[in-house]
Structures are given as structure tokens and as C-alpha cells.
């Protein structure tokens, strides 16, 4: 069957946002078409399975605040028997050693001189009435030493920009307000804060990787077209142009990165506004290592690395998250390096060599034992909550809504939200669009 030439509702992008929205539309019998540029749905929430080795496109772990378990996620078609709830075990590489994360709540593990420096500067931290930037927020909350040893270098490395350029909107639930009692407990006795933080526990599949979630969300969708990227959108004429032909629509839900969607739209004012949106690009390297993980890792799930002399900001150990992610006698790792969207990153081969050199120098893996399974760029990874973001996004959304276009998901809304929030908010948007539809929009 060829590509539909007309749909009441066009859904752009079959990641978890687009699939969840399409499921909601389908449940109401509405005429929709879901387009995906890749050969399969799932977007970044896909897994790569090669023999007995399983990897994700990047480190993806599911934190649930609203749903009791994966089986309770609407339209996800999950069985709790296929998932495990894991208590987070993460560490920070500081001063040549691995200490429990969060750094700011586990000062006990630092060398005495550094610990005392962090404690003293915490008590002498500056009082800033109204913080103007993320950097001021961190400094006023934790003090100079904690910021200098971890919070400043790690977040600058993660976001690939100056923290002065980020607004306090960067905080949200992913970096909650500092808690004095936790800091004091953390430097007073061992193990006081090992289970603190928003992501102290997470869900992950027992086998196959996080792609299990996107497979469930895409199951049973009757109007999904893969290998069909949107190249241009004429907003006034309500037409989308693809390599497979032109598609007319009445309403559109888009999970494409907001900046990308604006760039392919016909409204030049959107081009201008979207040029103000900034983000990181992340290089994700998946590696199969012969032999066990180094003893220094313990059973750590992932490591935060603030040292700017090391190219990656995070290293994850899939083998410690799920025992069935790797063949016997091997360890599976992922490593992530971030660059700003306007920077020219190194060539992929050079970056891989630099990462392997660092792994060997740190004593974490020998190059001869490492095999690259997958290396990929995530062109839009973390959006910048800079000082202009909120105003710019609001203007873009106002314009798009006049054209009956409704962005959904983390990237469509140019936000930083969890997988659960992405799914639930996309369903809510689809419900609103459903309420706007007439009986003529029903599938025949």
C-alpha cells in the first residue's frame, strides 16, 4: 500500500512521544498518519542487539513519578515481569578516585583536606537574593569549593557552555534546591546519602535494552510509515513534503526537535526565532570489552566525570544494570561526550582514539580488549535553558498553534523532561486535538 496523500492528523516523528500520541488518536478511531525518518520507530529510545550484546542509543533509564510501574504506562504494552526496579549506584571521579554520587551529599568520602575545604566554603557560601544564572544558583547553594571540584566543571562539560549563559530555569526537579541537612549528614558519617537524588531508583528491562519500551508503544499502530522524513512543511497550505510524496493534513502533532521543525517550515519568522535556540550535540560510544569491569568500579551503574582532560562526561556500565546485556566474559560500556551545537567536533575516528587513550590511562580498559559496537551522534541532546529560551519558545508555540501545529515531547517542546513525562504529556496533547476533531475525521 502506498503512502497516504491526506490525513486529518499528521504526526511527525515516531519516537516515544509520537507513538504515544498516535496510540491515543487511534484509540478514538481518528484518521492519522505517523511518519518516521528511520527504518523503525523508537527514535533515541531504541536498542542495538548484536548477538548476545545489547546497547542503547544512549544511556536511557526510566524514572516513574506518576505510573506505579512500566505496566501502568498508557499504551506501552509492557509486562512488569520484563522489567526490574534498580536502586541507583552512581559515582563521581574526583581527585583520582571514585566517590558515591551525588558529590555534594557524600563529602565524607573525600580526602580530609578537600572535605574540610568544601565544608568551610559551604558555610561561607554567598547569599544571593535573586540568582540570575545557573552558576549563581549553584554557588549560593553549595559554596565555592563544592562548585569548583564538581558542580561547575561537570555541568559545563555536560552542557558544553558557560553556566553564566544558563538561567535558573535549568534547575527544575533534575537539580533540586540544596538541602543543608543532607550536606551536613554527608560529611559527618559514611553512607548517609547513598540513596538521595531524584533518580535514586529507576526501571530498566531485564533483557533487550530500553528499546523494549518503544517496541511496546509502537505495537499495533496501523498508520505508521517509516523511512519517510519530512523535508518541508507549508504551514499555510497545510502540506508536508516527503521523499515519498506530498501529504495534506488538517492538524499536526510534531515531536521533531523544535529548531529542526521551524527550519523546514514555510514561515520565515519561525526561522528567525529558531536560530536563537541552542543545544548540545552528544557523541555516544558503545563498547564491548573483553574481561570484567575494573574492581574500582564495584557494581557502579554509571560514573560522572568532571575532569575536562577526559573527553567523556559520563561512563555507563550496562553489565551492572542488566546481567543479560553482554556475552559471558565481557563487559558492555557506553561513553558520552558533549559539544555545543555551534562547535566543530573532532572527527569520529579521532574522538574514539582519544576516548580509548583515556580509558587505558585511567586503568579502566585496555584498547586491545575493546571493540566498538556502535558510535553515533545525537544531534540534539540537551536543550539550553538560556536566558532567552522561555520567551523564544512561547513565541514559536503561539505561531505554530495558529497553524494548527502542536509540538509534543521533550524535543518538540524544547524542554528537559523524563520519558514518562514525554509519554503522558504527548497523550494529553493528543486528547486536546481529539476534542477539536469532528466525526468527519474518523477513519473509514
Image (spheres, helix red, strand yellow):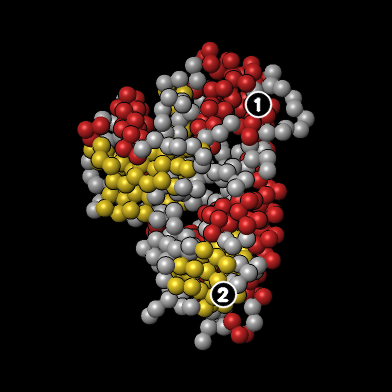
Q: Residue 210: x, y in percent?
A: 41, 54
Left or right: 216, with 171 as reference point: left
Quarter occupied by residue 133: top right
Residue 203 or residue 218, whichever sits in front: 218
Q: Residue 420: x, y in percent?
A: 54, 56
* Above or below for 317 versus 397: above
Q: Residue 364: x, y in percent?
A: 32, 29
Q: Residue 438: x, y in percent?
A: 64, 82
Mark 2, Cα crowd under 10 Å, few <14 / some 14-19 / many 20+, is many
Total numbered circles: 2
Quarter occupied by residue 83: bottom left
Q: Farthest residue in the right direction?
A: 129
Mark 1, Cα crowd under 10 Å, few <14 / some 14-19 / many 20+, is many
Under circle 2, the secondary element is strand
- Can see residue 25? no
Left or right: 429, with 372 as reference point: right
* Above or below for 216 versus 438: above
Q: Which residue is mark 2?
A: 249
Q: Residue 67, labelled with which disc? A: none
Q: Measuring 39% from the left and 78% from the top, which residue is drawn there? A: 2
Q: Measuring 28% from the left and 49% from the top, which residue is drawn there? A: 53
Residue 204 or residue 355, whichever sits in front: 355
Residue 90 or residue 262, whichever sits in front: 262
Left or right: 270, with 212 as reference point: right
Q: Measuring 32% from the left and 24% from the top, which residue is drawn there? A: 361
Under circle 1, the secondary element is helix
- Can see residue 244? yes
Left or right: 88, with 318 as reference point: right
Of the 4 image quadrants, the one containing the N terminus is bottom left
Q: Which residue is mark 1?
A: 139
Amino acid at each position: 500500500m502506498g503512502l497516504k496523500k491526506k490525513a486529518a492528523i499528521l504526526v511527525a516523528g515516531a519516537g516515544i512521544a509520537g507513538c504515544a500520541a498516535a496510540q491515543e488518536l487511534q484509540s478514538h478511531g481518528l484518521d492519522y498518519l505517523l511518519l518516521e525518518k528511520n527504518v523503525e520507530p523508537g527514535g533515541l529510545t531504541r536498542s542495538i542487539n548484536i548477538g548476545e550484546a545489547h546497547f542503547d542509543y544512549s544511556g536511557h533509564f526510566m524514572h516513574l513519578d506518576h505510573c506505579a510501574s512500566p505496566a501502568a504506562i498508557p499504551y506501552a504494552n509492557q509486562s512488569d515481569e520484563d522489567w526490574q526496579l534498580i536502586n541507583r549506584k552512581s559515582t563521581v571521579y574526583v581527585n583520582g578516585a571514585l566517590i558515591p554520587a551525588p558529590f555534594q551529599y557524600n563529602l565524607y568520602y573525600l580526602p580530609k583536606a578537600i572535605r574540610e575545604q568544601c565544608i568551610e566554603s559551604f558555610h561561607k557560601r554567598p547569599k544571593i537574593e535573586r540568582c540570575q544564572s545557573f552558576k549563581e544558583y549553584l554557588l549560593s547553594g553549595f559554596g565555592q569549593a563544592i562548585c569548583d571540584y564538581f558542580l561547575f566543571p561537570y555541568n559545563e562539560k555536560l552542557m558544553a557552555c558557560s553556566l553564566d549563559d544558563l538561567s535558573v530555569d535549568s534547575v527544575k526537579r533534575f537539580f533540586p534546591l540544596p538541602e543543608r541537612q543532607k550536606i551536613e549528614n554527608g560529611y559527618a558519617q559514611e553512607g548517609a546519602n547513598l540513596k538521595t537524588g531524584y533518580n535514586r531508583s529507576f526501571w530498566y528491562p531485564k533483557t533487550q535494552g530500553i528499546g523494549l519500551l518503544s517496541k511496546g508503544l509502537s505495537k499495533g499502530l496501523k498508520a505508521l510509515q517509516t523511512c519517510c522524513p519530512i523535508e518541508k512543511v507549508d504551514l499555510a497550505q497545510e502540506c508536508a513534503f516527503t521523499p515519498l510524496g506530498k501529504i495534506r493534513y488538517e492538524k499536526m502533532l510534531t515531536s521533531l526537535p523544535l529548531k529542526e521543525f521551524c527550519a523546514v517550515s514555510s514561515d520565515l519568522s519561525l526561522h528567525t526565532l529558531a536560530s536563537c535556540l541552542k543545544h548540545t550535540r552528544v557523541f555516544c560510544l558503545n563498547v564491548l570489552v573483553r574481561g570484567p569491569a575494573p574492581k574500582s568500579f564495584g557494581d557502579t551503574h554509571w560514573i560522572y566525570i568532571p575532569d575536562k582532560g577526559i573527553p567523556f562526561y559520563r561512563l555507563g556500565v550496562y553489565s551492572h544494570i542488566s546481567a543479560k546485556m553482554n556475552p559471558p566474559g565481557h563487559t558492555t560500556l557506553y561513553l558520552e561526550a558533549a559539544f555545543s551545537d555551534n562547535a566543530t567536533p573532532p572527527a569520529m575516528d579521532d574522538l574514539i582514539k582519544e576516548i580509548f587513550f583515556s580509558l587505558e590511562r585511567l586503568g579502566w580498559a585496555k584498547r586491545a580488549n575493546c571493540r566498538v559496537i556502535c558510535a553515533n551522534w545525537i544531534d540534539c541532546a540537551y536543550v539550553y535553558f538560556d536566558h532567552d529560551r522561555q520567551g523564544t519558545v512561547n513565541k514559536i508555540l503561539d505561531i505554530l498553534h495558529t497553524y494548527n501545529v502542536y509540538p509534543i515531547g521533550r524535543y518538540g517542546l524544547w524542554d528537559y523532561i523524563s520519558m514518562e513525562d514525554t509519554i503522558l504529556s504527548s497523550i494529553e496533547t493528543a486528547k486536546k486535538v481529539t476534542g477539536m476533531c469532528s466525526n468527519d475525521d474518523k477513519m473509514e
